[in-house]
Amino acid sequence: MNEIILAAIQWKQVGIVLGIFAAIAAVLVTLILLVAKFCKTNAEEKVERILEHLAGANCGGCGCTGCTGFAEKLAKGEAMLDDCHVTGTDGKKNIACILGVPFEEGTPTVSVCRCAGGKRAKNEYDYAGAQDCREENKLFGGAKLCKYGCLGDGNCVRACPEDTICIKEQCAEVDPDKCTSCGACMKTCPKGLFTRIPADAKVYIACSSHERGKAVLDKCEVGCIACGKCAKVCPSGAITMQDNLPVIDYGKCIKCGECAAACPRNTIHTRY
């Protein structure tokens, strides 16, 4: 009888110990869930607050699939605010405040296509495939003799969220008054022809060929032949020749337009 009572007491003690452990485990699990929920809510709230101030273009120019993805990266410190070229100054100031980082206002930019060939550039063969620059580019760099030039199949047109780009005479052309500088065209062009320039810039180089002289003359009517006249006439020294192409330092450019007037090939385009 005593043995039965002793066993009962031992089992009761075991039950009490197990109950204590169970209670402690329940409390710990509850605390962990509460902490996780609190942290998750803070992170989600930060993303939502950032999204309120982003432009909402979902253009993909920042390298993310959309504004939500970009906001999540910003909240985690995995992206830079300057990666977005669509959101306005006020929106970026508010986001910088949310992130707790200093805000530095950048220079507004627009995108331009560094090619003006199109119909004025000779073809190497007749392309009859899908109207897709990437697909055409797979066939020996495309139908154009100039392997640097625009293929004119309109991938940039379809990618632009603001209907800013058109194909004019088989070559892409950007309307600077509509361009938000999102970068979608830069991301989609297989030739890498699009670049950003200051929104108030007067001129840009509408060529990407690194060949020179006769090699360019034989392929395109408007390609740069690397004669260097633009660099010679520039009164502010804003133009230098690099790898057979003029490069404009917009910080030095005084917007006189003398480079465009001197270019024998009309390769330097005036924007206004």
Image (cartoon, rainbow, N blue to C red):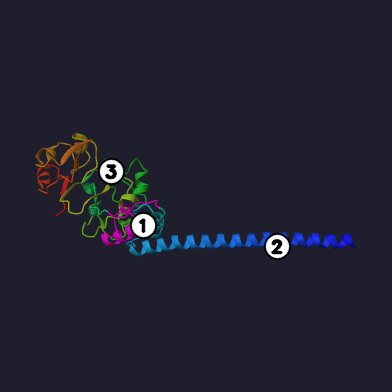
Q: Position of residue 141 (x, y in %)?
A: 33, 42
The local crowd at label 1, few if under 14, some if 14 to 19, many if 20 or more residues have their Cα within 10 Å, is some
Q: Position of residue 137 (x, y in %)?
A: 34, 44
What crowding class fits label 3: few (fewer than 14 Cα within 10 Å), some (14-19), or many (20 or more)? many
Disc 3 or 1, which lies upstream in sequence?
1
Q: Quadrant of the N terminus?
A: bottom right
Image-based side of 119 in relation to 233, left or right: right
Instruction: State left or right for residue 77 relative to residue 267.
Output: right
Residue bounds of the magenta highlight:
77-103
- Residue 9 seen in the current view: yes
Residue tagged 3:
144
The nearer-to-camera label among 2 and 1 is: 2
At which x and y percent is residue 224? Answer: 19, 40
In the picture as drawn, the residue positioned furthest to the right comes out as 1
Q: Earlier in the sequence, mark 2 or mark 1?
A: 2
Which residue is rendered at x = 38% and y = 63% of the image? 49
Rendered position, 69 above or below 231: below
What is the quadrant of the C terminus in the image?
bottom left
The circle on residue 99 is 1
Mark 2 or 3: the one toward you: 2
| Secondary element type, mark 2 | helix
Look at label 2 and name its amino acid: Gly
**Residue 154 in sight here:** no
